Image: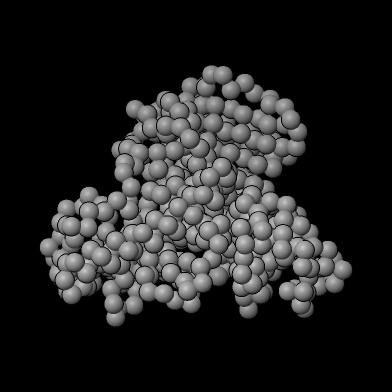
Amino acid sequence: MTTEASAAEPRVVTERQFLDELASVTRERVATRFLYLMAQEDAVVGVQWEQPGVDHLRRYRVRDACPHCVVLAAVVTLAPVLPLDVLRAGRARPQYETVLRTGRLPHLAFARPTGSPGASWLGDCHAVDGDPHSAADCPRHAMPPPTGDPLALRLGALPRAVRELYPHDGAAAADLAQRLRIAQDWRADAQAVASGIREAAATWAFLRNSCVLGVSVPGANGLVLTLPPGRAADDRSLGDLHEATVRALPAGGPVPYQELACLLPEPTSTTQRMPTYAGAVDLTAAAPVRTLRLPVPRRPLSTTGRGVLLLYEARHAMGRHMASAPVRDSAYWDSEAALNVFEFTLLERVAGRHYQEAVAAYLQALRREGDLLARPHKVLDRRRRKALSHAFGGLDDEELHLWASVAYRNAILELLGDLKAFAAHLSIQAG
């Protein structure tokens, strides 16, 4: 691998010069397979074009604009050049700004799809250590890094509406303390999995910095109260909050989710074992909110499995920006395919060769069968099942079946060899 350009000193340019050069170089480098737009320290913007055997890096300091606004303008410029579809181009801003709010450097990454000439490039955003802020930032992007823990609550000073959910303040404090422990335990398992996995850094940052504790309002499906730490005491009743929310929300049309998301631990023991993502309405902020429900199953999952699943659902939540049912078009299924690839990546890193051997066994069976498998649960022999279980520290039969089914999906992707074809497969399987 060679690098064509020196990264020593950034060139000073205007925004117009930067965008014109970006488009021109991207058109010239027709063999580019990956393209990165990278916020770097000291208001520098890096662009890297990667093609087989060669990395071409250029660094810029744009003298007449906020560097973060420049990166986002670059996405608009690249959309017709790469190309990028409306979903991926539109998703770049919230992904980029989510990482920026964590106090880390956002790196937008685009990848050419294989086997689909003219199809939209794939997109993602990575989080890299470093200070993303400078005096050149505009007011919107001059965000200080987060301070404190969004789960660090003072349970002695609860909002009136939350206290109304309980018979007395002691019951409220005890229940919320239990919910906090549940949320912290789930989050710690996600952190253990994400540690050292670059692809998971932005998702972990979202969980760590943007997810506060929430409580469901009993008897009102889809309504929650969030508890961000440090917020001034709120003496409004539950009824007052409900009326204010009805007045605040528009009667029709899609509404954006608020920047914060919430963790909804459910202390009651249940047969539900996995975390789930869902949209809800936050009465505290009078706005839609993304939620991650965290169960307390009667049969706990492995700690590694819990971490993978919470990161998966958090990634799902990060990709949802409007409080409306998504249109299940081709862009939607492309997004679902990318979410599956995120899960495959996590499993490859945490379960290593045992997971890879399971994928290889399914791939061999698929090639032999020439079609989807009628009995995929019969593919893994006793040795491979034991090895996969060992990689997670021991699994019961139900969880072992879960991760084996993920390996089967991974094998289908490898057989198809193309993310577009895999997205079409997911669409067909969903009916």
Determine the image quadrant of residue 293.
Answer: bottom left
Describe the colour scheme in one phrase.
Answer: one colour
Residue extending farthest right: 368
Residue 66 against residue 311 in the figure, above or below: above
Q: Position of residue 311 (x, y in %)?
A: 51, 56
Residue nearer the viewer, 267 or 30 = 267
Residue nearer the viewer, 304 or 87 = 304
> Viewed as shown, does residue 264 lie left or right of 169?
right
Q: Residue at x 38, y 48 (%)?
A: 209
Determine the image quadrant of residue 217.
Answer: bottom left
Residue 404 against residue 48 in the figure, above or below: below
Q: Position of residue 308 (x, y in %)?
A: 55, 58
Determine the image quadrant of residue 424.
Answer: bottom right
* Quadrant showing the C terminus: bottom right
> Viewed as shown, does residue 299 lie left or right of 370?
left
Q: Residue at x 57, y 45 (%)?
A: 197
Q: Is residue 4 visible?
A: yes
* Quadrant showing the N terminus: top right
Q: Is residue 421 visible?
A: no
Q: Residue at x 31, y 44 (%)?
A: 148
> Viewed as shown, does residue 190 lie left or right of 369?
left
Q: Residue at x 54, y 31 (%)?
A: 46
Residue 4 against residue 375 in the figure, above or below: above
